[in-house]
Amino acid sequence: MSLLATALLLLADAPVAAAPQKFAAISGGWTVDLRVDLADAAYTQPMDLTIADDGTVTGSFYQSEILAGKAGRAQGRTCIAFRTTDGQGLYHTSACLVDGRMVGQTWAEGRGFVLPWTAERR
């Protein structure tokens, strides 16, 4: 067997290292704090994000499927933006990862409000 054939066989048996996920820092489960005032009683909702290396965001927020979304990185920040619905209207959400937690806001287009929020990893 030639040296080249031996090398190819050895490479074929070598474990393939998984490529690092570009958006691993924000993919996964989050608990979103939706209190209007931090003195209010706790009010949280789950957010589950799956982010492909091309930046496509899927998952759910506030028990609604993410309809369309993208993630991006620039100026030292990793951020997401996506759209959900409650069947009555659209909700536009965006957030950036800041010191290990998400800092974001949701615009309830049909209900006419913007709610700033924070989220911690579950």
Image (cartoon, helix red, strand yellow):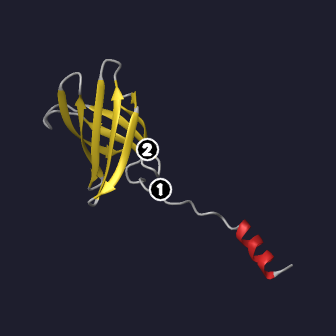
Residue 35 drawn at (x, y percent):
19, 33
| Mark identifier at residue 109 | none
> Residue 70's quadrant in the figure?
top left
Q: Nearer the viewer, residue 8 or 30?
A: 8
Q: Is residue 62 visible?
A: no
Q: Which residue is mark 1?
A: 21
Q: Which image quadrant for residue 9?
A: bottom right
Locate residue 18, reporting x and y percent.
Answer: 56, 60
**Distance from the alpha carbon under mark 2 to that under mark 1:** 12 Å
Q: Nearer the viewer, residue 2 or 16?
A: 2
Question: Residue at the spot x=53%, y=60% of the render?
Answer: 19
Mark 1 neighbour class, 10 Å CA radius: few under 14, some 14 to 19, many 20 or more: few
Q: Is residue 110 above or below residue 116?
A: above
Amino acid beneath label 2 = Thr
Across and down, in percent, residue 68 comes to 40, 35
Q: Classify mark 1: helix, strand or loop.
A: loop
Quadrant, the C terminus: top left
From what the image shows, is residue 122 above or below residue 53?
A: above
Q: Which residue is mark 2?
A: 56
Q: Is residue 11 left or right of residue 119?
A: right
Image point 35% across, 42% down: which residue? 30
From the viewer's perspective, tell me whether residue 65 is left or right of residue 13. Answer: left
Circle 1: residue type: Gln
Q: Secondary structure at mark 2?
A: loop
Residue at (41%, 53%) from the top-left corner? 23
Q: Nearer the viewer, residue 22 or 36?
A: 22
Q: Position of residue 88 (x, y in %)?
A: 31, 18
Q: Residues within 10 Å of mark 2 (few under 14, many from 20)?
A: some
Q: Quadrant of the N terminus?
A: bottom right
